[in-house]
Image: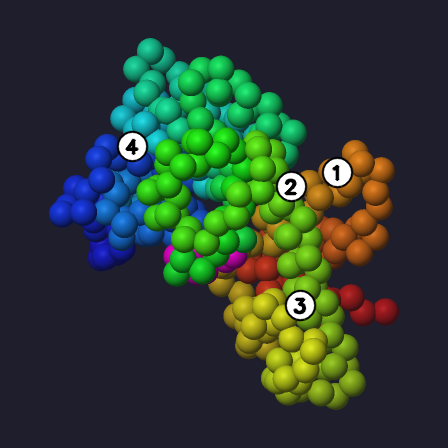
């Protein structure tokens, strides 16, 4: 059965010109696709994973067989890939978006969370080729992205941001321009640090309360009624209580971000002791087989932390 959010990938009454390329058809990519389609854009998708392509076709999405075809067909391309290595390969690889004489991509909007210095260098190389590079990581789960409730942290040239405002409006109505290339990733890592620790603190408090004889549902009610309340408790608390961990975002993805935080802090001579402890928990969760579960599943690892 096709997904009505994607069935508009062919031009309709609100069609806004040439197709927007989308590389990465996972949780974030499909949420972004739905928003673009709802705004009247045509979306041409690609993913190197066969299962993601199958799901995309099943939902009614238009699929490009290669990155070269995306680059040859679309002036604007949105990336929702795992990490900066993936971004570099997608854009500059031998069979990437800019490979071949037919490439016409003029703007790349990168919605991944990546390495600030590598992205800054990439932006400079692309600018020399006449291609605008906009960092656009999103703070929020895939469900929040789909609802337009996530916040985009923009890094890039203000003129390029203004020139592509219609596309950015479709992706995320709530945006903060934090500076030039590299600053979007820095901002996302810093905010993700706080979010991840809030989530871990909620899970640890829930387990502590449970050991003290307080039922998880009662503990969550207490948290939400006291100054301990947080957006993490609102978004993930009920999932932790019910043990529902179908991914809206994944533990392994947050571990990737946490390792970038630690590397960035080390480069600036700063220790992050709470984040170091968080990284150990996340590594243990991935080793236990929970890497593909929602970030709320960190509560499972804390239950395993017995003396």
Q: Judge left or right: residue 177 versus residue 272.
A: left
The N terminus - image quarter: bottom left
The stretch in magenta equals 140-146
Q: Earlier in the sequence, mark 1 or mark 2?
A: 2
Which residue does the numbered mark 3 point to in the structure image? Answer: 299
Q: Is residue 127 above or below residue 173?
A: above
Badges 1 and 2: C-beta atoms under 8 Å apart? no
Which residue does the numbered mark 1 point to in the structure image? Answer: 263
SS at mark 1? helix
Q: Earlier in the sequence, mark 4 or mark 2?
A: 4
SS at mark 3? helix
Q: Please tell me whether mark 4 or mark 2 is closer to you in this view.
A: 2
In the displayed orientation, state which residue is furthest to the left: 13
SS at mark 2? helix
Q: Determine the CA span between mark 3 and mark 4.
A: 39 Å
Q: Earlier in the sequence, mark 3 or mark 4?
A: 4
Q: Is residue 147 above or below residue 47?
A: below
Q: Determine the CA span between mark 4 and mark 1.
A: 36 Å
Q: Determine the CA span between mark 3 and mark 2.
A: 27 Å
Toward which corner of the image does residue 222 lie, by quadrant?
A: bottom right
Q: Earlier in the sequence, mark 3 or mark 1?
A: 1
Within 10 Å of disc 1 (Cα), the crowding (few <14, some 14-19, many 20+) is some
Which residue does the numbered mark 2 point to in the structure image? Answer: 186
Residue 183, position in %: x, y? 61, 38
* Residue 64, label in figure: 4
Specify whether residue 143 is painted magenta.
yes
Of residues 298 and 123, which is closer to you in this image? 123
Q: Judge left or right: residue 105 versus residue 19.
A: right
């Amino acid at each position: 059965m096709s997904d009505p959010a994607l069935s508009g990938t062919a031009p309709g009454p609100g069609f806004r010109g040439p197709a927007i390329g989308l590389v990465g058809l996972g949780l974030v990519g499909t949420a972004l696709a739905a928003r673009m389609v709802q705004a009247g854009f045509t979306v041409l998708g690609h993913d190197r994973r066969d299962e993601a392509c199958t799901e995309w076709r099943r939902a009614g999405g238009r699929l490009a067989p290669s990155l070269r075809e995306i680059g040859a067909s679309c002036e604007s391309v949105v990336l929702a890939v795992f990490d900066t290595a993936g971004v570099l390969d997608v854009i500059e690889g031998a069979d990437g978006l800019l490979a071949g004489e037919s490439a016409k991509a003029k703007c790349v909007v990168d919605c991944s969370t990546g390495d600030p210095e590598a992205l800054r260098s990439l932006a400079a190389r692309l600018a020399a080729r006449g291609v605008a590079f906009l960092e656009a990581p999103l703070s929020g789960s895939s469900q929040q992205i789909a609802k337009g409730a996530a916040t985009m942290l923009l890094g890039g040239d203000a003129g390029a941001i203004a020139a592509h405002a219609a596309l950015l409006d479709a992706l995320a109505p709530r945006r903060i321009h934090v500076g030039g290339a590299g600053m979007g990733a820095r901002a996302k890592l810093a905010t993700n640090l706080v979010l991840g620790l809030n989530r871990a603190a909620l899970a640890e408090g829930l387990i502590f309360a449970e050991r003290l004889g307080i039922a998880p549902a009662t503990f969550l009610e207490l948290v939400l009624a006291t100054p301990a309340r947080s957006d993490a408790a609102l978004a993930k608390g009920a999932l932790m209580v019910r043990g529902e961990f179908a991914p809206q975002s994944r533990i392994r993805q947050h571990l990737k971000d946490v390792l970038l935080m630690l590397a960035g802090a080390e480069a600036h001579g700063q220790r992050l002791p709470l984040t170091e402890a968080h990284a150990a928990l996340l590594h243990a969760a991935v080793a236990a087989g929970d890497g593909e579960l929602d970030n709320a599943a960190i509560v499972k690892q804390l239950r395993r932390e017995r003396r």
